[in-house]
Image: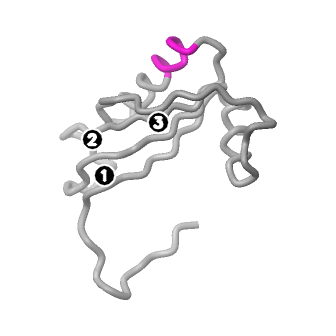
Amino acid sequence: MFIFTITAKPYPNNKDVDKDVTGASIKAWINFPEREAAEMVANFYIHQNGWGPENTTEALWVEEKDIAEEDREFYREALEYGSTFIFNIWGGKPQAAGDETDEE
């Protein structure tokens, strides 16, 4: 399985992100043995979700024994469905002090 880290910017018509979001670092877990094809799959799905892939900053081949415990759910999901994506976005509106939200 490959794990890619890909930077991307939201397309202007992406209704799923705040207008102030300027980009994301996306960790793409792709269950495919060939690197170029796996990267094409990652970029395709990023594009389909309203983002313009820019740069692949990391490409790693991993096996189950290499995966940290906290990442095993992503590995298992990619095994079952073929891929999984984790978006770490930046930009957006700053939160006021004490206005944190728990995401679970």
> Quick one: SS at disc 2?
strand
**Residue 103: percent from the left, percent from the top?**
52, 68
Residue closest to the eye, 56 or 83: 56
Q: Which residue is drawn at 25% across and 53% down?
A: 21
Q: In which quarter of the image is the C terminus?
A: bottom right
Q: Which residue is drawn at 64% across and 25% down?
A: 61
Residue type at mark 1: give it. Val
Q: Which of marks 1 and 2 is nearer the N terminus?
A: 2
Q: Mark 3, mark 1: which one is toward the viewer?
A: 3
Q: How crowded is mark 2: few (under 14 residues within 10 Å), some or many (20 or more)?
A: many
In the image, 97: left or right of 42? left
> Quick one: SS at disc 1?
loop
In the image, 74: left or right of 16? right
In the image, 25: left or right of 69? left
Residue range (magenta): 35-41
Residue closest to the eye, 24 or 56: 56
**Residue 42: percent from the left, percent from the top?**
48, 26
**Residue 39: percent from the left, percent from the top?**
48, 20
**Residue 63: percent from the left, percent from the top?**
75, 30
Q: Which residue position holds label 1? A: 17
Which circle marks residue 5 in the picture? 3
Q: Residues within 10 Å of mark 1 (few under 14, many from 20)?
A: some
Residue type at mark 2: give it. Pro
* Residues marked 1 and 2 touching at CB (< 8 Å): yes
Q: Which residue position holds label 2? A: 10
